[in-house]
Amino acid sequence: MSDHSHAPETTDVVESIVPLMPIVLPIGGAVLIFLLAFIAVFMA
């Protein structure tokens, strides 16, 4: 019979970001905390 399970080889965006997670998450967290602290000081 015919085999229709051959998918084109494309690079997944999520799979390309996963190795960078140990770098991206702490930086993103630091930026988020800084923005929240800035908003809290600005609103006070």
Image (spheres, rainbow, N blue to C red):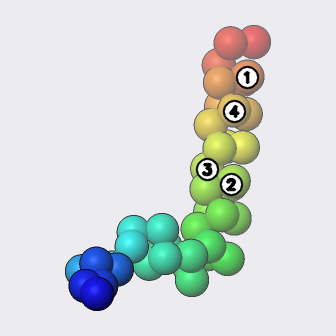
Between 10 and 35, the one lying in front of the other is: 10
Q: Do the residues under discs 3 and 1 have CB atoms within 8 angstroms?
A: no
**In terms of secondary structure, where does tag 3 sit?**
helix
Q: Could you tell me residue 14's position as x and y percent?
A: 48, 68
User: Viewed as shown, does residue 4 lie left or right of 15?
Assistant: left
**In terms of secondary structure, where does tag 2 sit?**
helix
Residue 33's quadrant in the figure?
A: top right
Q: Do the residues under discs 1 and 4 have CB atoms within 8 angstroms?
A: yes
User: Viewed as shown, does residue 8 lie left or right of 17?
Assistant: left
Residue that label 4 marks: 36
Residue that label 2 marks: 30
Observer able to see residue 11:
yes
Q: Could you tell me residue 38's position as x and y percent?
A: 65, 31
Q: Earlier in the sequence, mark 3 or mark 4?
A: 3
Q: Could you tell me residue 37's position as x and y percent?
A: 73, 33
Task: Say what amino acid the circle numbered 2 marks.
Answer: Ala
Q: Earlier in the sequence, mark 2 or mark 4?
A: 2
Q: Could you tell me residue 7's position as x and y percent?
A: 29, 79
User: Viewed as shown, does residue 36 lie left or right of 13?
Assistant: right
Q: Earlier in the sequence, mark 2 or mark 1?
A: 2
Residue that label 3 marks: 31
Q: Do the residues under discs 2 and 3 have CB atoms within 8 angstroms?
A: yes
Spatial separation of the CA atoms under disc 2 and disc 4: 10 Å
Residue that label 1 marks: 40
**In terms of secondary structure, where does tag 4 sit?**
helix
Q: Residue at x 73, y 22 (%)?
A: 40
| Dot 3 alpha-carbon crowd within 10 angstroms: few under 14, some 14 to 19, many 20 or more | few
Observer able to see residue 10:
no
Position of the C terminus, as image quadrant, is top right
